[in-house]
Image (cartoon, rainbow, N blue to C red):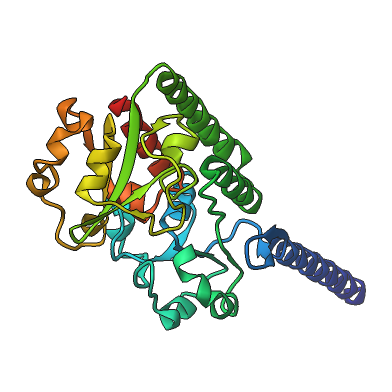
């Protein structure tokens, strides 16, 4: 009478083992679900809901912050103050800065997704050998559209459509309100970047073109260069342009060099401009405008600063 019992026990064990095997395969299959993401350099298969993310772009980190993504590594050198919680988190590795990272350390982190900034795109081949790697969209002619594409990609990867849709809707609403305010103003603006005592001017279609292209602020100077280095701008050029609002982005401060001296900037020539006379020389947040600029947090800062200046 013992044999049937043994046979029954064996049958239960086989069934239990088969069930466990089936569940294990199911979990493995779930873990292997991937989505296809196209970016500037490639089309790549990315695991859904990655658990170990290396973010080498501050705009991407801002967007990932919305959903509390599991970040294991970032460039902590030069990290904007509004992202300081990531610098202070000992569980998140410091992998360098925005232009030079420690590839070995990134490899040791065993990431399943790497978000690569434009300043590092030459390292794409090496990075993609470590993990699925994507480069966020950056389009100076349509920065809001670029943000939307980036959020759409992240929503697909992390299955967080509602969260990203809500954040994007808020940004669009805020931008529309500022654009309407700008349309009722005759004020013309000039944007300049300060770097070690020198200035470059930027207009529509440039890295700082959001002011004109999305927020509708009128340009004080037309036909400026749209490449990253802008158009060389002397004090005489600024006076001749005579903007009603002068926006200044201090690159030197953003990268840790000696910040500009307002007394030198607001010299006798600049004091003759409408911007100076109107109290409209606006020193913008250099971290948001120069180090990042394409994420939810920085774009909120940028829009708010322009709105306040109008």
Q: Nearer the viewer, residue 303 or 198?
A: 198
Vertical comparison of 203 with 173: above or below: below
Q: Measured from the top left, where is residue 191 in percent x and y? A: 33, 42
Circle count: 0
Is 127 situated left or right of 237 in this image?
right
**Quadrant of the frame with the N terminus:** bottom right
Q: Nearer the viewer, residue 8 or 39?
A: 39
Q: Measured from the top left, where is residue 91 in percent x and y? A: 35, 65
Specify the quadrant of the image occupied by residue 38.
Answer: bottom right
The extreme bottom residue here reads 104
Look at the image and tell me whether residue 26 can be seen: yes
Q: Nearer the viewer, residue 14 or 68?
A: 68
Residue occupying the point 38% across, 44% down = 298
Vertical comparison of 44 with 259: above or below: below
Vertical comparison of 272 with 114: above or below: above
Q: Measured from the top left, where is residue 239 in percent x and y? A: 22, 40
Is 46 situated left or right of 14 in this image?
left
Residue occupying the point 34% across, 34% down = 189
Look at the image and tell me whether residue 117 can be seen: no
Specify the quadrant of the image occupied by residue 124.
Answer: bottom right
């Amino acid at each position: 009478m013992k044999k049937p019992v043994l046979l029954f026990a064996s049958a239960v064990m086989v069934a239990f083992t088969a069930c466990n095997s089936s569940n294990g395969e199911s979990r493995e299959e779930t873990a292997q679900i991937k989505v296809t993401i196209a970016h500037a350099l490639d089309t790549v298969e990315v695991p859904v809901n990655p658990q170990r993310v290396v973010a080498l772009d501050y705009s991407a980190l801002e967007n990932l912050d919305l959903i509390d993504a599991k970040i294991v590594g970032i460039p902590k050198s030069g990290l904007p103050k509004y992202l300081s919680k990531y610098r202070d988190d000992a569980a998140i590795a410091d992998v360098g800065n925005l232009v030079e990272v420690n590839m070995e350390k990134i490899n040791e982190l065993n990431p399943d997704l790497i978000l690569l900034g434009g300043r590092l795109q030459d390292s794409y081949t090496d990075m993609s050998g470590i993990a699925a790697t994507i480069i966020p969209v950056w389009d100076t002619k349509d920065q809001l559209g670029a943000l939307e594409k980036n959020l759409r990609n992240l929503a697909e990867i992390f299955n967080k459509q509602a969260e990203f849709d809500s954040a994007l809707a808020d940004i669009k609403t805020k931008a529309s309100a500022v654009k309407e305010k700008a349309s009722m103003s005759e004020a013309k603006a000039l944007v300049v970047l300060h770097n070690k005592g020198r200035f470059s001017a930027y207009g529509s279609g440039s890295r700082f073109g959001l002011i004109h292209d999305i927020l509708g602020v009128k340009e004080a100077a037309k036909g400026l260069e749209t490449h990253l280095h802008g158009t060389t701008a002397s004090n005489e050029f600024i006076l001749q342009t005579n903007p009603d609002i002068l926006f200044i982005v201090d690159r030197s401060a953003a990268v840790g060099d000696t910040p500009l001296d307002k007394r030198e900037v607001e010299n006798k020539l600049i004091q003759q401009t409408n911007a100076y006379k109107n109290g409209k020389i606006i020193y913008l947040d250099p971290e948001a405008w120069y180090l990042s600029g394409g994420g939810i947090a920085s774009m909120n800062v940028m829009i708010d600063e322009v709105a306040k200046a109008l």
